[in-house]
Amino acid sequence: MTQPIDHLRSLIRDVPDFPKPGIVFKDFTPLIRDPAGLALAVELMVNPFRGRSLGGKAVGGVDLVVGAESRGFIFGMAMAQALSAGFVPVRKPGKLPRAKASISYELEYGHDTLEIHTDAIQPGQRVLMVDDLLATGGTMHACCKLVQGMRAEIVGVAVLIELDALKGRESVKQFGPVHSVLRY
C-alpha cells in the first residue's frame, strides 16, 4: 500500500537545467492537477497550524496567510480557506496599485524584489508564511522581513517542498517554526 507522502512524491517531477543550467526544478504541476494529491498536500501543510504547537511554540489562531508570487498563491489561498484566515499576496514589482513596502534579495540563481501593500497587515496580526518551495530561503526570508516590518507576529513558515542541501531552513527559522511536507 502506498503511503500518503510516497503518493505526493510520485506527483513531483524533476526538470533538469531549469531555470538555468545546474538547477533541478521540482515541478509540482502534476500534483495540483491531481485532486487527491492537491487536497492531501494542502492538508499536510496546514495541519501543524491548527491550534497545536510546532517546535514547542503555540501556533494556533492564524489571522492571515501570506504567500509569495506566484506559486505561493496556489497553496496560500487553499491554506487560508482551511484555517478560516485571510490571504495576503506578496507580489513582484509593478503589480500592486496602492502604497507598498518593498524588499530586494538574492536567489540561488540571481536577485529579485518583492512588494506588499502597506495596509495589508495590521500590527499584532498572527501570520503564517507559505510558499511552494524552500531552497536557499531568500524569497521566504524577504517575505518574512516585509511582514516583520509591519509589526505582525509570524507564527510559522510552511512549504510543500524543502531542498535540504541548500539550507534555506537556517535562513528563516528565526521567524518561527518551519514545516515542510516533502524534503529532498
Image: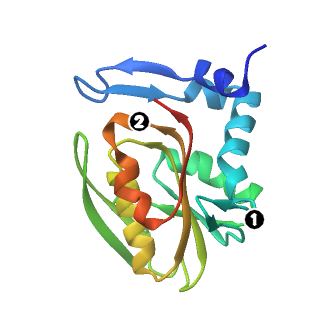
* Position of the N terminus by quadrant: top right
Along the horizontal axis of the image, is 136 left or right of 46? Answer: left
Q: Toward which corner of the image does residue 5 lie, by quadrant?
A: top right
State the residue in front, 95 or 125: 125
Q: Toward which corner of the image does residue 172 lie, by quadrant?
A: bottom left
State the residue in front, 68 or 117: 68
Q: Are marks 2 and 1 in contact (CB under 8 Å)?
A: no
Residue at 45% of width from left, 52% of height from top?
69
Q: Position of residue 151 (x, y in %)?
A: 47, 83
* Position of the C terminus by quadrant: top left
State the residue in front, 91 or 177: 177
Q: Toward which corner of the image does residue 6 lie, by quadrant?
A: top right
Q: Which amino acid does label 1 sit on?
A: Gly
Ranked by sequence position, the earlier of labels 2 and 1 is 1
Along the horizontal axis of the image, is 55 left or right of 105? Answer: right
* Residue count near mark 1 (Cα–Cα under 10 Å), binned few <14, some 14–19, many ≥20: few
Q: Is residue 91 visible?
A: no
Compared with 97, 54 (above or below) is above
Q: What residue type is labelled 2?
A: Leu
Q: How far is the residue under mark 2 from the one under mark 1?
A: 27 Å
Q: Where is residue 96 in the image (x, y as percent from the top left)?
A: 43, 67
